[in-house]
Image (cartoon, rainbow, N blue to C red):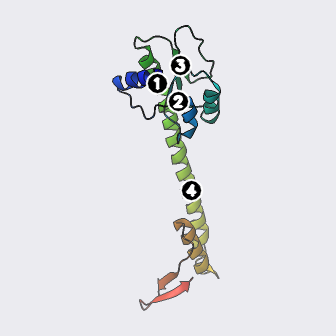
Amino acid sequence: PVRTWLAEELARGGHEVAWAGTPAELEDQEGAPDVLVIGVPDAPSVLDAFRGGCPEVPVVAWVEPGRPAPELTAPFEWTASTDGALLAAVERAVPWVNLRRERDAARAESAAARQEAELHRRAAGLLRDPDAEGFHELLLAELLRAAGASAGALWLADDAGRFVLRAT
């Protein structure tokens, strides 16, 4: 079938084929692929549903000669020939993949920076007055929150070097 030919062509071109299956099985796949390469299905509703959930995943469609190409929004490529055009269409999708990876990495970095800034803000507020009433309880609460723990105890050394329970 077309599925086997597509997988063989992509593998021969040095691409990793993570899954090859029927369009109906697409919904059962975990996560979004880098690129979805399809032989145009008879029921385009499955592809439409996939694009609704993963609009940023590039789709490369191999269309049997004589059949109409599907109309999809970018990122979308299609080809009807068998002379290497499939691999060229997949290669044209690579910049979309790289942009998505860079964007996702930037989002993760930004989220980590926001979390770190919030931790610093809370710590600065807490340490403004370490002699305040309830300081040890607040410090322990912040430490538990930062560690993702549900319970803990704060033991601090006194002037004689003995550990004293300050908060639970």
Which residue type carries mark 3? Glu
Where is the C terminus found, in terms of image quarters? bottom right
Q: Kindly identify the amino acid type of the residue bearing the numbered disc 2.
A: Thr
Residue located at (40% from left, 11% from top)? 83
- Asked if the residue under mark 4 is in contact with the one under mark 1, i.e. CB atoms within 8 Å, the reply is no
Mark toward the start of the polypeptide (4 vs 2) = 2
Query: Is 155 or 157 nearer to us in this picture?
Result: 155
**Label 4 – label 2 distance at C-alpha:** 42 Å
Amino acid carrying mark 1 in the image: Arg
Find residue 92 and report its horizontal and vertical position in percent. Answer: 47, 21
**Which quadrant of the structure image shows residue 129?**
bottom right
Dot 2, crowdedness within 10 Å: few (<14), some or many (≥20)?
few
Q: Nearer the viewer, mark 1 or mark 4?
A: 1
Judging from the image, what secondary structure is the residue with disc 1 in?
helix
Alpha-carbon neighbours of circle 1 within 10 Å: few (<14), some, or many (≥20)?
some
Label 3 sits on a secondary structure element that is strand
Q: Which residue is mark 4?
A: 115
Residue at the spot of label 3: 77
Residue behind mark 1: 3
Depth check, mark 4 against mark 3: the one in front is 3
2 or 57, which is in the foreground? 2
Q: Residue at x 56, y 62 (%)?
A: 119
Cα–Cα gap, marks 3 and 2:
20 Å
Disc 4 residue type? Gln
Asked if the residues shown at circle 1 and circle 2 are in contact, with their CB atoms under 8 angstroms apart, the answer is yes
Residue 115 vertical placement versus 104 (above, below): below
- In the rendered image, residue 38, in percent from the top left (x then y), is placed at 51, 24
Please tell me which of labels 4 and 3 falls first in the chain: 3
